Amino acid sequence: MSLGEAAKIATASLWAHKLRTVLTLLGVVIGVTSVIAVVSLIGGLNAYVADKVFNLGADVFLVSRGPLVTLNVDDYMKTQKRRKLKMDDYEFVRDNCKSCTAIGAELTHGNSKVQYGTDYIENTNVMGWTEEMPDLENYDLDSGRHINLTDVAHRSPVCTVGYDIQDKLFPGVDAVGKEIRIDTALCQIIGVGKKLGTVFGASRDNWVEMPITSFQKIYGSDDSLTIWGKGQGVATMQQSMDEVRSLLRGKRHLSYSTADDFEIETNDSFLSIWSSISGSFFVITVAIASISLVVGGIVIMNIMLVSVTERTREIGLRKSLGARQKDIRLQFLIESSMIAALGGLCGVILGIIFAKILTATTALPSAVEPWSVLMGMIVATSVGVFFGVYPASKAAQLDPVVALRSE
């Protein structure tokens, strides 16, 4: 029997029992749908996080009191016992790092209120910057300018604001030159940032930057700084990080055997944390989806056994006309594989549709990975082959005389 003829017979058999075929492949459909949807969502999230959330630049690194992303409460509490990074630490690194092209410092205060007249906007992120930060942070402006050395040196009451503040407090009017109140202090707007959009539905445009000295005048100088550093390129960034580490250890008089009491992180550090989170989520989802695939495979095997019983006389007749064991085995294996492959195809389509619907209705991005589509089809077909071996072997081993006597 040729492969084409076996496929034709299998197709006719499946078409003759359409409802049974549909119910049989449901388990495979559910399993493949889950895998494709999750892979698409995780792929979209990975690209989104790399582009929108952790996008420091290839040669930029951060120095902070503790990890900026902490998943363990105990680890967080340990870092809070460390010495804070202060302005003298920043100035020492800035003045002595020979391999760095720029060193800046930042303080932040979230959930601030910005007011102009009777209008106001809340949950604003206020950032206190040194003069190097605009280049390190790379915020583009629609109008005006960023803070500079003079602003920092004289504690100037000036600020640059995000697009949301321009849009909500000064609709249709240029905000540059206007005076706003930030919590308890007044400042004059000297620049307006370009629109950045949202991250997971949260606006990235509700921010204010001001000289770090003005920030400390408003909010105090007790908080720990985040020091930003930039190397001379990707190839030499590790050298710059090592130099900053040595400078801070020396200034803090840490002995050779004492661990760092600060953290140095890069874009890769943040992305690796995210990858571990998304990877764990992916493994758990695949494990759950595998249960559906196994159940679907068992259902396929059960239905194929029923099919062998129903077609015992047909099998005997084919054998009496010269069909060999491998022909009978091939026919039933193709039938079980077709059921699973059809379920895989439906699962791939439904998984992509489900991911796109989530993207359209929520803030979750998605990206269809070609390898996941191929993997879904291969796994689904493999399930059909694996669970179809026993029914196919049972059919192939039937005695033609006994089979022909079957009613």
Image (cartoon, helix red, strand yellow):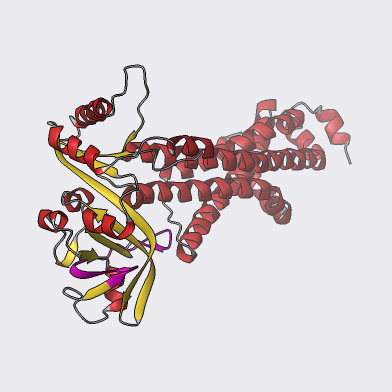
Residue located 27% across and 80% down the image: 171
Residue stretch in magenta: 181-203
Q: Position of residue 321 (x, y in %)?
A: 72, 32
Q: Nearer the viewer, residue 167 or 15?
A: 167
Q: How many marks?
A: 0
Helix, strand or loop: magenta stretch: strand
Q: Position of residue 326 (x, y in %)?
A: 66, 27
130 in relation to 274, above or below: below
The C terminus is located in which quarter?
Answer: top right
Q: Nearer the viewer, residue 267 or 76?
A: 76
Does residue 335 appear in this view? no
Q: Position of residue 183 (x, y in %)?
A: 35, 68
| 232 sits left or right of 382 in the view | left
Indicate yes or no whether the magenta region holds residue 193.
Answer: yes
Does residue 308 appear in this view? yes
| 163 sits left or right of 345 in the view | left
